[in-house]
Image (cartoon, rainbow, N blue to C red):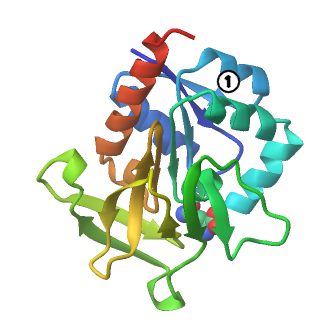
Amino acid sequence: SPTVGVLALQGDVREHAALLAELGAEVVLVRRPEELDAIDGLVLPGGESSVIDKLARLFGLQQPIRAAIRAGMPMYGTCAGLILLADTVLDAIEGQQSFGGLDVDVRRNAFGRQSESFEIDLDVPVLGDAPVSATFIRAPIVERSGAAVEMLAALPDGAVVAVRQGPLLGTSFHPEMDGEPGFHALFLDEARRYASAPR
Ligand code: GLN
């Protein structure tokens, strides 16, 4: 079973760790750069992207995480985590940075007050025929994506809410809160592949 990390600076770290452990992974909570050396994949949790960004820079994690992304380490970002993986963040807080890696423009807090949070069943063909229940909380959407980016799910109005680019996976919503294992299982497949690749 692969050893994977959950970036544990802020956000719904425990829900991710629990779901990954249920799927058979060894889980490390990552707060220091050297902890990246021991893992084959990293989950960036939901929370507040501007806070996680600030703490990551404070803890000296921003550059090492960027280097891990460049080296091909699989990563899965949910909500704030998707924002952190985006090359471009729209409606960012002043000075907010991302790790980047996904060739997308992501808009923070893309839903109005009326729909700050909601739950909906999504079609996610890459996970099979069964609908996936998805919880959105002050969620972002993907407004532009480059040619290398695969769209994995969209809302009925067409807004893109799940993407993949090579070993990087991002969802606007929170499968870890609904106990929906599909995306985490995809991530662990990538982590297993990365673990066994020569490097
Ligand atoms: N609005 C948050 C942000 O900008 C994301 C919300 C979430 O992760 N549930 O980071």
Amino acid type at image mark 1: Leu
Q: Nearer the viewer, residue 36 or 67?
A: 67
Residue 112 % position (x, y):
52, 88
Q: Is residue 9 above or below residue 150?
A: above
Residue at point 60% right, 51% down?
Answer: 85
Residue 101 % position (x, y):
61, 46
Residue at point 88% right, 44% down?
Answer: 58
- How dense is the environment of label 1, judged by Cα within 10 Å: few (below 14), some, or many (20 and up)? many
Q: Quadrant of the C terminus?
A: top right
Residue at point 21% right, 62% down?
Answer: 123
Residue that mark 1 sits on: 36
Q: Nearer the viewer, residue 113 or 84?
A: 84
Lateral position of residue 112 relative to residue 24, left or right: right
Res 48 visible: no
Residue at point 56% right, 48% down?
Answer: 45
Residue furthest to the left: 129
Residue 57 % position (x, y):
84, 45
Query: Of helix, strand and loop, which one carries label 1?
Result: helix
Q: Quadrant of the N terminus?
A: top left
Q: Nearer the viewer, residue 121 or 190?
A: 190
Res 193 visible: yes
Residue 39 % position (x, y):
58, 20
Q: Is residue 192 above or below residue 123?
A: above
Lateral position of residue 42 relative to residue 63, left or right: left
Q: Mark 1 near ligand 1 (CB under 8 Å)? A: no
**Ligand 1 visible in quadrant:** bottom right
